[in-house]
Image (cartoon, grey):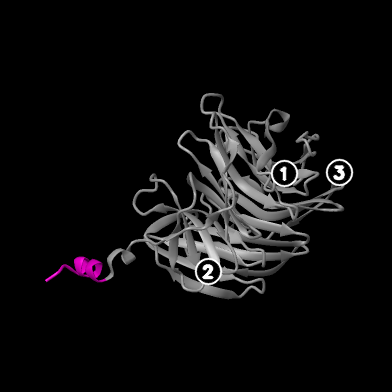
Amino acid sequence: MLHKKSLLLALFGPALLPLTLSLSCAAAPIVLTKGETSDSINRMYASPAGDLCLAGQRFDPEGDARTRGLILLVSLSKQRVLWQRTVEPPDENEGSRFMACRTDGQLTYAAANVDTSTIRTDTHGLVYVYQFDTAGKMAKPVRLATTADNAFVYDLDVDADGVSVIGMAQDGRAQRRTNGIFLARLDAGMRPAGTTKLPTGAYDWSATGRLSGRTALLGGNFAPAAISGGDWPHDYAVSKIVAGKYSFSVRPQRGKRGEIATTITAANEIVSLGVQGTASRLTVVGADGKVSTDTAVRSTLCEVGSLAATASTVYAVRAPCGDPTRPHRLVAIDRASGSETAVGAIVGVPQEVFVAADRVLVVTKKGDDTLLLETLQR
């Protein structure tokens, strides 16, 4: 008698192995950075005209211990980087990471988390906003008056009247901390125009957020207004905040920090993929606060490093179970069925995935640490 596994292979053959989805390559990869330093991208924004800003950080393993802000403007129509800048931490601070950006093709804005110390346990987090012109020339950065001991960026947005930023505001130290969410404004001249705070708890620094006008959508690990001890609670939640007030908060996943990835779609859905052991679960919370999808995902992969979603498909950068050091893979998950398919059209090792209009944009890394932007047609 055939062993059960052998019998299944005999009956179904290679169908048991992960299928490969071949999206068409819209163009040759765009070289973002050349690999002399260790670079990573945190967020990307596509303007209606097709210009992309990419916000991240740069670290030189052969240099000092400081991280520096990294900002790039890319033209998809011209298939090239228009400009890029490495930005020193402001005011002689120790580290900087660009966490969010916006561009209209003329002016580009970025919000940065800035560390006052290289020792993480003693670090004070500050928030700065930057403005760049069409050639990448930088105006003097503006520090936001969050009035908090530690502040971290979720996202920023830009309109005709100025810049808005949302993030976490934390006071106190390890034994007792208070947490809130701040919303700050700069006017069109980059002058402070007010800060408000929701003192009823906050998402941690790794949360995913999207700010659009007066509406913010957030997902990540949430802490109440006051916590004691050094550990952040493992309490995943998603929220919608409108005009400084909570519209809803929902807890669609159960898991620890780092086990759940989040993305927000163009339709204002909050999509999360959680992993517990070898089990994966996909949830979708709609703009009305109701859970519209709660589906088990059939996968041979575990850790989720990055997530993006369309109305029908979730794209995820995932690591093999049992060995997260092996190269990550890009997969496509059908939102209705939970079936997962490997995406085989990319050249480098996937790092971050984004969705813009009819394209999937993937930041990948080659063996020499060169970062590429690969564009796949959906």
* 254 is within the stretch colored magenta: no
Question: Residue 160's spot in the image, x, y percent?
Answer: 86, 53
Q: Amino acid at mark 2?
A: Thr
Circle 3 or circle 2, nearest the eye: 2
The answer to the question of whether label 1 and label 2 lie on touching residues, with beta carbons closer than 8 A, is no
User: Which numbered circle lies on residue 302?
Assistant: none
Say what amino acid the circle numbered 1 marks. Answer: Ala
Q: Which residue is mark 2?
A: 283
Residue where numbered disc 3 is placed:
191
| Res 339 → quadrant | bottom left
Contact (CB < 8 A) between labels 3 and 2? Answer: no
Q: Is residue 306 left or right of residue 12?
A: right
Residue 187 visible? The answer is yes
Residue receiving disc 1: 110
Q: Secondary structure at mark 2?
A: strand
Q: How far is the residue under mark 3 from the one under mark 2?
A: 40 Å
Marks 1, 3: nearer the viewer: 1
Q: Position of residue 323 (x, y in %)?
A: 35, 48
Kindly identify the amino acid type of the residue bearing the numbered disc 3.
Answer: Arg
Q: Give the magenta-colored segment's residue range.
A: 1-11
Mark 1 or mark 3: name the one nearer the start of the chain.
Answer: 1
The reply, left or right, for residue 14 in relation to residue 59 is left
Q: How many marks?
A: 3
Residue at the (59%, 43%) spot, across then down: 41
